[in-house]
Image (cartoon, rainbow, N blue to C red):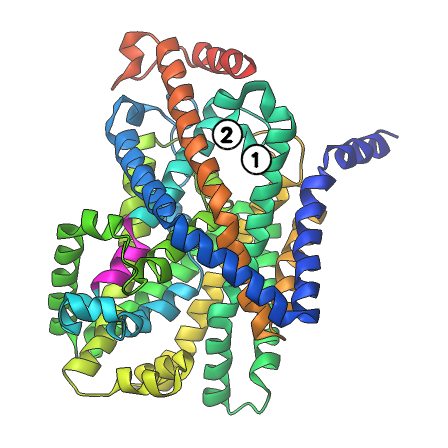
Amino acid sequence: MNDKNSVSAARKNIDWVITLVPLAIICGMSVLFFVFPDESKSILTNIRYILGDRFGSYYLIIGVLIFSISIYMAFSRYGDIVLGGQDEKPKYSFFTWGAMMFTCGLAADILFYSFAEWVLYATDPHVKSLGSVQEWAGVFPLFHWSLIPWAFYLVLAVSFGFMLHVRNRDKQKFSEACRPILGKHTDGIVGRFIDLLAVFALIAGTATTFSVATPLMASIIKIVFHVQLSRITLSIIILLITCAIYTYSLLHGFKGISILAKICIYLFFGLLAYVLFLGGKTGYIIDTGIESMGRMIQHFIELSTFTDPERKTMFPQNYTIYYWAYWMVWCVAAPFFIGTISRGRTVRQTIVGGYGFGAGSTIISFIILGNYSLGKELVDGIPLIKSYTKNGDMYNLIINIVKTLPCSTVVLIVLILTMVAFYATSFDSIAYIASCYSYRRLKDGEAPNRIIQLMWCLLLIVLPIALLFSESSMSNIQSVSIIAAFPIAAVITLIAASFLKDAEAFMKGLKPSMARNHVPTDRNKIKEYASETSEE
């Protein structure tokens, strides 16, 4: 009888509106894309153009603002706040924590873009106007994948970690992080809208992540193993295998996620080390990397605020604004997971460590893989730019780059395994957070029901499989995710402001000796104050 009551209570605790409505909307839109591909594409393209052309500065301002807030959080007195009991120690080692954080924040697309993104910039009119390919082609990948993107993650991760581990709130949702400002409206229509928007953005954003690199993996398999299946069929098989891996990992809890994250990190850095030391371009890679980093830092403010007012090249609209928007959409899942695993670490440790391990590893990837292929173009004279300009096939371009490495067949196999590991580690964390979103209330440390976790594991893979059958539909969904970032950006700003307000109240509730660089002795008192303030 008690078991029946507990099951019934668990079912009542599931928020079916938040779970099913965004999914139904996305699936309905996908059907429309299939039935009316040209009309839907035209409408979404126009909306996306308007947002980028007329409101592009909005995205850029949010990017600079959130980055500035992250620095302020880390080095102000708020940096001393521990995400948990104020004398609590971190649950995970620095390596395990950093590995899970890095792999949950990025999917296999980092390897896809690391090898060849510089080619896109090398052929862009704006980049050509700045100077030579050597000077600028390697700068923009570092800029678009490092400081501001990870600022979105880290500011929200700290906000969510503070909400979960310090305030001990039992609603693991976007809206709950806005409670210090929204107050009672958090439980009303405004809060519901924020949560619906968040889950909608989560599904729309993650549904297309597989589409970037999965065809590359399929192409590699066809070449290495001489498989006669079509690229679409192979891509679906890869998706199903990946789904099985991350589902198995997730159902084994954080231990399974951490093991998979470590495997991914070993494969990733092993691949980077191989390219760096055995690719024959060690000196060029290091020299160009240092130069590109210096140029990015030197021109950081300029790059962050370039709007192209005369619309001569549309560079920020095509690249910077696009990237900021897409990172914002991904902010629904990754920061929650980072905040969850950061219990016991200070705000400063979380932000500085996040920049070091997350942004740092990302930069290293682009420096090594990107500059290796750049060196093949500029030093060895291999016409990579000409090849891409001729056929526009990025997948074959990357394969041809890898073939220039010693034992290229082995490298291609390792590349596939690394990409699968990246997909699995990012999507098991996403499925976990989506599962938490399905509950009305979920206490800190309480895991969602395994059936709910399994449901989300399957839901996250169904839509990408469906979208593989239509390139136009895939493009449309990508546009939807970018459009969804417009209101999400406002919510991100609201969450950051809410944290600052709540953290200030928390600091005032402590004795002066506890506020900075002092470990409190009365942990229960702090916890009691935190709970009282949360209820208010």
Q: Nearer the viewer, residue 389 or 444?
A: 389
Q: Is residue 518 above or below residue 142?
A: above
Residue located beneath label 1 in the image? 173
Q: State the quadrant of the N terminus.
A: top right
Residue 85, position as x, y percentages in the image: 43, 22
Residue at image location 67% in from the left, 70% down from the top? 34
Q: Is residue 364 visible?
A: no
Give the side of residue 75 with respect to residue 411, left or right.
Answer: left
Q: Determine if the magenta segment contains residue 141.
A: yes
Q: Nearer the viewer, residue 25 or 55?
A: 55
Classify mark 2: residues with Cα within 10 Å, few (<14), some (14-19) or many (20+).
Answer: many
Residue located beneath label 2 in the image? 177
Q: Secondary structure at mark 2?
A: helix
**Overall secondary structure of the magenta section:** helix
* Real-space Cα separation, disc 2 to disc 1, in angstroms: 7 Å
Q: Nearer the viewer, residue 393 or 426?
A: 393
Which quadrant of the structure image shows residue 97?
top left
Disc ID at residue 111: none
Q: At label 1, which amino acid type do we have? A: Lys
Give the side of residue 75 with respect to residue 466, left or right.
Answer: left
Residues marked 2 and 1 touching at CB (< 8 Å): yes
Q: State the quadrant of the C terminus.
A: top right
Residue at image location 13% in from the left, 51% down from the top? 298
Residue at image location 31% in from the left, 24% down from the top? 78
Q: Is residue 536 above or below residue 387?
A: above
The segment highlighted magenta reads 139-147
Residue 454, position as x, y percentages in the image: 68, 53
Which quadrant of the structure image shows residue 514?
top left
Q: At label 2, which amino acid type do we have? A: Ala
Classify mark 1: residues with Cα within 10 Å, few (<14), some (14-19) or many (20+).
Answer: many
